[in-house]
Image (cartoon, rainbow, N blue to C red):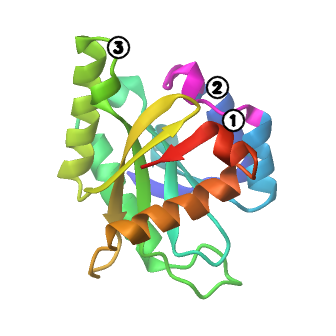
Amino acid sequence: MICRQLSEEEVIEIYSTVAQNHFPSDELKPVKKVRMFLSEKMYLGYGLFRNEKLLAYAFFLRLPHFDKLLLDYYAVLEEFRTKGIGSVFLQLLRDELKEKPLDASESIMLSGFYIESENPDYAKNDSEKAIREKRIAFYKKNYADFTGILTTLYGVDYRIFYIPLKNMPLPASDEYRQELEHIYRNMFPSPLFEQVSRIY
C-alpha cells in the first residue's frame, strides 16, 4: 500500500463522487468551496492506494505559515473497511506529514492536526450514537487526544481531537481554542464566522 498526496484534480474527482456517499449532506461543502480552497492553496488531500486502486482518502484544510492542519474528511471505501486499513492509513499519514514541509517555499514543519468528530451526546438515535462512539474510539486508538473543546458548525456538534506529529508537549486548552478559532475564521470570514460556528 502506498500513501501519496493527491493532485488538485484527484481531490475534486474524489470529493465530487466518492465522498458524497460517505458523509451526511449537512457536513459536505459545496464543490465550488473546495475548488476555491484548492486555488488558494488552503486544501490538500492524501490517498491510500494498492496497485493504483484507491482504498482510503483524507482531506485537510491548511493555512499559510501555520504548523497545524484540520482534518476535513477521512474515509475508507466500503469494500475495504473492517480490515484495519483505517489505522494503517492514519499511521502512514502521520509519517508522511511530519517528514516534510507542505510547500517548498515554507520552512515550517507540521506539528499536528485537529479532528472534528461528531458528538455522540447529540446523536438522533442509539444507532447513530454507536457509530459516533466507534469513530471516536478509532481516533483515540490512533494517538488522538481529546482537547476538551466542543464546536458547533452549521448546527452539527463536534468534539475536537488532536493528533501530534512530534514528541512535544501538547498545547494547553486555551491554545487549542485560539488555534481552532484561527482556522475557522479563515474558513468562515466575518460575519459568517459568528453566524455558523460556536467554540466552547
Res 186 quadrant in image: bottom right
Q: Secondary structure at mark 2?
A: loop
Image location (x, y in percent) of residue 184? 60, 54
Q: Which mark is on residue 17?
A: 2
Q: Amino acid at mark 3?
A: Lys
The residue wearing badge 3 is 124
Contact flag, marks 2 and 1 (Cβ < 8 Å): yes
The number of callouts visible is: 3
Q: Earlier in the sequence, mark 3 or mark 1?
A: 1
Image location (x, y in percent) of residue 173? 34, 66
Contact flag, marks 3 and 1 (Cβ < 8 Å): no
Q: Which residues are magenta?
A: 20-31
Viewer can see residue 43? no
Instruction: Tell me the residue at 81%/55% (across/down).
Output: 39
Q: Within 10 Å of the Cα at label 3, are there few (<14), some (14-19), or many (20+) other Cα atoms? A: few
The residue wearing badge 1 is 13
Q: Nearer the viewer, residue 94 or 183?
A: 183
Marks 3/1: CA–CA distance: 31 Å
Residue 130 colored in magenta in the image: no
Marks 2/3: CA–CA distance: 26 Å
Q: Amino acid at mark 1?
A: Glu
Image location (x, y in percent) of residue 120? 28, 29
Q: Nearer the viewer, residue 134 or 11?
A: 134
Q: Secondary structure at mark 1?
A: helix
| 72 relative to 18, above or below | below
Q: Amino acid at mark 2?
A: Thr
| 100 relative to 25, above or below | below
Q: Earlier in the sequence, mark 2 or mark 3?
A: 2
Instruction: Tell me the residue at 34%/30% (across/down).
Output: 80
Can you tell which of label 3 and label 1 is closer to the viewer? Answer: 3
Instruction: Tell me the residue at 61%/53% (across/down).
Output: 6
